[in-house]
Image (cartoon, helix red, strand yellow):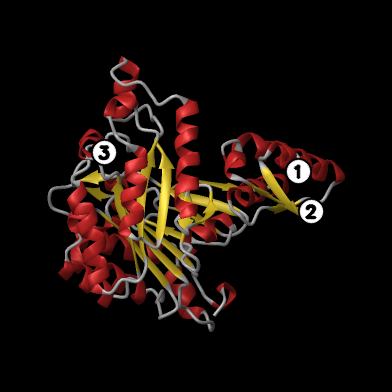
């Protein structure tokens, strides 16, 4: 079944709940000791109604099976088994269902992954776990304000495998300040030993309104120098590709056949539906996003109002620039049409930043370090 055969083919639900805020986190989260999963699933149902998703699906004669569902956050695993079941039921009531071909991902914190929880998620139709490992260094995890330790991270992957999950992804963060004392080489080696199917590798960024931002502003923390961050990015590329992972997007690696389908839809600019606080949606030419605060989102929906925070329509030039940037992010690359662009691509090849096959240019790992600057060059076409 292709994307064109599915209604609401790619669905993202932002689950904002967390036990605490990580030191670097600038996402829309709601710290709760007791997670109001019933209120949350009810609010998602209200959003589906406010945005006429239920009516659109009921009026449609086409298949209503989604290709992907991604429960992101926040920490969706904080919903518990009952909360995840309630959320999937609400989606189904609005005509968004899943079958054996769907990729259904839930982001989880390691401490939430027990053998029983993993087995229950699998029974509910979850097919893919994305485990927020971030590091396998005790010192680094404590500095990040993570609520798990290295042993729990490794145990989460093992529990998922024992439960029967055949698609497990882990996240890692590089470019931590040198004062943290984390060995990036050791983290990479230990993650490879865990044998996940997919690895996402993100560089640490300093956002002003976070604990890390305040530490940096006071001079308590010195950010990793750009040259050292680049070295860690390239080390990850060398280590993970040598271990058999395909570096298919600037921040993502996968075993052959295990690429993340949901995020790949974003990079291909396929339409998707976003639900929950701060969630974005895209219809192919325009984008909208919800209010970020959980309380504001629920309050709007309780009144029957659309929790819209903003929207934008993309002109032809903006769409071309976006296609260029997103294409260069992936190993698919972009097709160069003009003689000037082909000459630019050839120069990139000489610099070691890209490869070319015909008129299609694909960035190398060295090129991905320069992604923003290179994309602007072609985005001006």
* Image quadrant in which the N terminus is located: bottom right
Residue closest to the eye, 122 or 186? 186
In the rendered image, the residue lying farthest to the top is 219
Q: CA distance from mark 3 to mark 1?
A: 40 Å
Residue closest to the eye, 43 or 262? 262
Q: Which residue lies at the image location 23% right of the left edge and 55% below the top edge?
A: 154
Q: Nearer the viewer, mark 3 or mark 1?
A: 1
Task: Left or right? Give the position of 321 relative to 172.
Answer: right
Kindly identify which numbered label has been placed on residue 22: 3
In the rendered image, the residue lying farthest to the left is 33
> Which of the 4 image quadrants contains residue 269?
bottom right
Circle 1 — which element? helix
Q: Which residue lies at the image location 59% right of the left edge and 52% below the top edge?
A: 330
Report the residue marked by disc 2.
Answer: 359
Cβ atoms under marks 3 and 2 closer than 8 Å: no
Near mark 2 (Cα within 10 A), the count class, few <14, some 14-19 or many ≥20, is: some
Query: Eyeballing the image, is 179 above or below 298?
Result: above
Query: Eyeballing the image, is 6 above or below 75?
Result: below
The answer to which of marks 3 and 2 sits earlier in the sequence is: 3
Whether residue 280 is visible to the viewer of this picture, yes or no, is yes
Query: Eyeballing the image, is 284 above or below 55?
Result: above
């Amino acid at each position: 079944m292709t994307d064109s055969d599915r209604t609401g083919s790619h669905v993202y639900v932002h689950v904002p709940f967390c036990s605490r805020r990580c030191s670097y986190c600038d996402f829309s989260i709601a710290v709760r000791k007791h997670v109001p999963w019933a209120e949350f699933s009810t609010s998602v149902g209200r959003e589906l109604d406010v945005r006429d998703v239920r009516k659109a699906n009921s009026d449609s004669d086409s298949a209503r099976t989604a290709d992907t569902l991604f429960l992101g956050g926040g920490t969706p695993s904080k919903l518990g088994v009952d909360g995840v079941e309630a959320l999937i039921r609400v989606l189904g009531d609005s005509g968004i269902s899943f079958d054996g071909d769907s990729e259904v991902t839930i982001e989880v914190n390691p401490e939430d992954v027990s053998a029983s929880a993993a087995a229950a998620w699998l029974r509910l139709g979850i097919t893919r776990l994305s485990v927020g490992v971030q590091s396998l260094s005790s010192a680094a995890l404590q500095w990040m304000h993570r609520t798990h330790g290295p042993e729990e991270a490794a145990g989460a992957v093992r529990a998922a495998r024992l439960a029967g999950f055949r698609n497990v992804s882990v996240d890692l963060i590089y470019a931590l300040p040198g004062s943290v004392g984390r060995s990036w080489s050791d983290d990479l080696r230990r993650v490879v030993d865990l044998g996940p199917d997919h690895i996402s590798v993100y560089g640490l960024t300093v956002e002003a309104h976070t604990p890390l931002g305040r530490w940096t502003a006071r001079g308590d923390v010195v950010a990793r120098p750009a040259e050292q961050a680049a070295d860690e990015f390239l080390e990850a590329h060398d280590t993970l590709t040598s271990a058999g992972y395909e570096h298919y997007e600037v921040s993502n690696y996968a075993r052959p056949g295990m690429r993340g389908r949901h995020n790949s839809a974003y990079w291909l600019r396929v339409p998707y539906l976003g639900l929950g606080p701060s969630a974005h949606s895209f219809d192919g030419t325009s984008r909208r996003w919800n209010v970020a605060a959980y309380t504001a989102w629920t309050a709007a929906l309780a009144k029957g109002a659309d929790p819209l925070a903003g929207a934008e329509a993309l002109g032809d030039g903006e769409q071309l620039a976006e296609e260029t940037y997103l294409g260069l992010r992936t190993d698919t690359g972009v097709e160069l049409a003009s003689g000037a662009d082909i000459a630019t691509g050839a120069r990139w090849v000489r610099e070691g930043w890209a490869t070319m096959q015909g008129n299609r240019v694909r960035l190398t790992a060295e090129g991905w370090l320069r992604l923003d600057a290179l994309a602007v060059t072609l985005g001006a076409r």
